[in-house]
Amino acid sequence: MEDGKKIWRISLLIMLVVFGYLLFFVKKPSLNNPEWGVTFSPMQANDLGLSWPEVLTGVLDDLGVRHFRLTAPWNSIEPNAGQFDFAALDWQMDEVAKRGGRVILAIGEKTPRWPECHFTEWMWKLGTTDRQAKILAMLKVVVDRYKDHPALDRWQVENERMLPFGICPRASFGFLRQELKEVRQLDPKHEVMTSDSGELSSWLRSAAISDVLPISMYRTVWNKYLGYFVWPLTPTIYFYHANLLSFLVPKVIVSELQAEPWSDRALTQTSLEIQAKSMNPEIFQKNIIFARETGFSEIYLWGAEWWYWMKEKNNQPDYWQEAKKLFQL
């Protein structure tokens, strides 16, 4: 009993110390306008029945976006073992470079967009040891190809790899750390990072191995138990969370700010009425304001392909026009 009281008192003391540190020694978040960017996925554009080069050109030239997070899905760049195809990724990188843009390039076995781990049949047949060897070999090929590309800004190795979300093999933090070490050795000139969930993680492990920490920021989500709900978090909580980890990583950025609906199925199979429960013009604007109030200096929006789809296929250009205002400030 006494031991239990002692632990409780120590825990309370730690909480008070942390609260005091946040209250008195950490400045409030700044509302300076951050660098805004987008995550872009050809696969998502294709799934929406769009021409992905057309969408990317619109994002570049009509919206005026200059900061991108692009992806190198494993099944796209290495459809057959040892046979690489970089035509689509080369085109994206080159088009961004032509406009003086910068790219965070997400690489690894788990990259943005469902099902997260983008595998072809031959990849699923590999045992753990063989799969990891193939991943390291793939990383080497990708890094060697793009490390001197004028658009490259940073490497993102894996996407929320330790979060049990998506259709993926079991995660290994030891192997994730090995992947980042490998990329750093191959390209010591660019920062290397791995992303984490803004709401479902402590960020500790990702912060410990990243030069910059990218997190996701989702506000209105759905699960089978609660239905649609809004995360009960404030911008200041994200800001304080980042400050508490500043001894591990000097900078936190938002790699995915929710700017499209959350659905348990493809958006083309979700009615616009249901989509509006988690994303409508009011929610879109609120999410932008929320993200700014965190004080983070870089924020990448999630949903550019959907904005284009809403504009072109559903005669609803509101999101596209709101985004244009943001990127042309």
Image (cartoon, grey):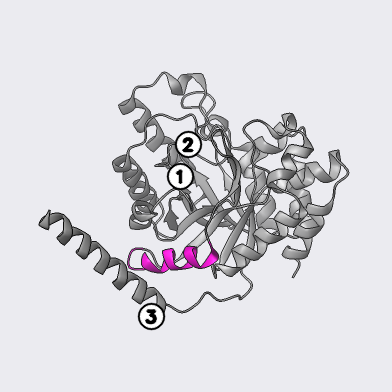
Q: Position of residue 93 (x, y in %)?
A: 63, 49
Q: CA distance from mark 3 to mark 1?
A: 30 Å
Q: Position of residue 230 (x, y in %)?
A: 59, 50
Q: Nearer the viewer, mark 3 or mark 1?
A: 3
Per the image, label 1 sits on a secondary structure element best described as loop
Distance (Cα) linking label 3 and label 2: 36 Å
Magenta stretch, residue numbers: 234-248
Of the 4 image quadrants, the one containing the C terminus is bottom right
Q: Are marks 1 and 2 in contact (CB under 8 Å)?
A: yes
In reply to whether residue 119 is colored magenta, the answer given is: no
Q: How many marks?
A: 3
Residue 25 - label: 3
Real-space CA distance between mark 1 and mark 2, rounded to the nearest whole angstrom: 8 Å
Residue positioned 56% across, 76% down in the render: 30
Name the residue located 78 percent from the left edge and 53 percent from the top edge.
Answer: 319
Q: Earlier in the sequence, mark 3 or mark 1?
A: 3
Which percent across, then down, holds residue 35? 62, 66
How would you rate the neighbour count of disc 1 (Cα within 10 Å): few for under 14, some for 14-19, many for 20 or more? many
Q: Amino acid at mark 3?
A: Phe
The kind of residue on which mark 2 rests is Phe
Foreground of the two, 139 or 208: 208
20 to the left or right of 303: left
Up the image or down, 37 lies above or below 270; here it is below
Position of residue 78 relative to residue 229, above or below, is above
Q: Between residues 15 and 54, which one lies in front from this camera angle?
A: 15
Q: Assign the magenta stretch its main secondary structure.
A: helix
The residue identified by callout 2 is 165
Q: Secondary structure at mark 3?
A: helix
The amino acid at mark 1 is Glu
Crowdedness near tag 3: few (<14), some (14–19) or many (≥20) residues, C-alpha within 10 Å: few
Categorize mark 2 by other alpha carbons within 10 Å: few (<14), some (14-19), many (20+).
Answer: few
